[in-house]
Amino acid sequence: MTTFHRGAFFQDQAMNITEARRGDRLVVAPVGRLDSNTAPLLDRHLSAVIQRGDARLVLDLSGIDYVSSTGLSVFLSAAKKIKAIPGGSLALSGLNSRIRLVFEMSGFLRLFPIFAHVDEAVAQP
């Protein structure tokens, strides 16, 4: 799990979410399973982040150990909202081999910029 020195911490059900400012980007790091029970929590959190004006996001998925189809829909929803904002961007980082396989099988690897580490994602222009 990535440790942030500053950021907000939220807990609900079986998912923790931290966020930390890295330059002009906000890194959001959910930890746990992303399934039908926890997807609404992450969706609400990302919607609130975008609504408050943070539209240059990096999702650090290094703490996610499972993603269901409901979980995948959260990424699509966030991407759609961010795409509507000039200058908005959404990058993903830290996918483990199982999560990467889910993204590959679902075609999501083509939909998002994906980086091995948060540092690479925040360094993108």
Image (spheres, grey):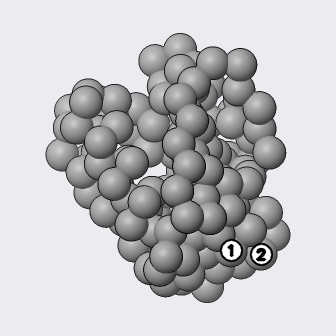
Q: Earlier in the sequence, mark 1 or mark 2?
A: 1
Q: Compared with residue 5, is residue 1 higher up or lower down, i.e. above or below?
A: below
Residue 42, image x, y percentages: 45, 57
**Viewed as shown, does residue 58 lie left or right of 102?**
left
Residue 51, image x, y percentages: 22, 38
Q: Kindly identify the residue that appears in the image at 40 percent across and 73 percent down.
A: 73
Q: Secondary structure at mark 2?
A: helix
Q: Amino acid at mark 1?
A: Tyr
Residue that label 2 marks: 98
Residue that label 1 marks: 66
**Viewed as shown, does residue 104 lie left or right of 84?**
right
Q: Compared with residue 5, is residue 93 higher up or lower down, i.e. above or below?
A: below
Q: Compared with residue 82, is residue 77 higher up or lower down, i.e. above or below?
A: below
Q: Kindly identify the residue that appears in the image at 77 percent across and 32 percent down.
A: 3
Q: Amino acid at mark 2?
A: Arg
1 or 2: mark nearer the eye:
1
Residue 109 showing in the rendered view: no
Q: Which mark is residue 109?
A: none
Q: Kindly identify the residue that appears in the image at 70 percent across and 26 percent down.
A: 4
Pick the residue in front: 26 or 123: 26
Pick the residue in front: 15 or 88: 15
Residue 25, image x, y percentages: 48, 25
Q: Badges 1 and 2: C-beta atoms under 8 Å apart? A: yes
